[in-house]
Image: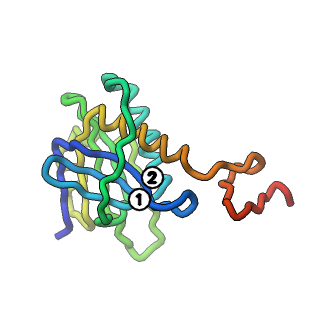
Amino acid sequence: MPDLHDFRNATRFTTGTIGEPGARMFFVQVGDEESVITLKLEKQQVKALAQFLRTVLDDMPSPQDGLTPVPLIEAEPAWVVGQIAVGVDEADSEVVIVLEELVPDGEDSEADIDLGSQIDDDPTLGWDEPTGAKVRAHISVELAAAFVETSDSLMASGRPPCSLCGQPLDPSGHACPRLN
């Protein structure tokens, strides 16, 4: 049976990287007072999750001012994230996030993000017939806002884009397709 982690009162939900821009690995950490789990994911998953959380936060009570990016605690990733589902528990003013392990199914499978799932309508959503490990985290508005700030900081610290084509510039050079 796959691992199922349920953080009902998550006190940690952050993202971070290891490595230099252009060769960074992206991670997400989820935890509470008792345990923390680190998962590997793609840059685009972090970016999409942060963008969606930003829209969710627009409809929720404002978090406190002065949020600062939260660094990763050093840890080895338990597994790679495939699908991500996001919902809102309006009764408790929380965001609910479900992260599922990427499990190859024999075909070319891409990581998906289910942006807009109403997880709070069905508390068992995402827990039926597990095929890989899953993490469900109930996070506060403040944790969600801090995740967005941390993600924005990570995206800004990446490689600068080429002014002609928009692709990232490498320190070793850039073969811009617009110059052909």
Point out residue 52 in the picture as x, y percentages from the top left corner: 43, 39
Of residue 143 and residue 3, the one placed in the foreground of this image is 143
- Give the residue type at disc 2: Gln
Quadrant assignment, res 128: bottom left
> Mark 2 and mark 1 in contact (Cβ < 8 Å)?
yes
Point out residue 6 in the picture as x, y percentages from the top left corner: 17, 51
User: Which residue is situated farthest in the left direction here?
Assistant: 34
Of residue 1 and residue 19, the one placed in the foreground of this image is 19
Q: Residues within 10 Å of mark 1 (few under 14, many from 20)?
A: many
Point out residue 157 in the picture as x, y percentages from the top left corner: 54, 47
Left or right: residue 175 versus residue 60 is right
Task: Indicate the colouring scheme.
Answer: rainbow
- Give the residue type at disc 1: Leu
Point out residue 98 in the picture as x, y percentages from the top left corner: 28, 50
Disc 2 designates what residue? 45
Disc 1 designates what residue? 41
Mark 1 to mark 2 CA distance (whole Å): 7 Å
Above or below — where is 30 with respect to 80? above
- Assign a secondary structure to mark 1: strand
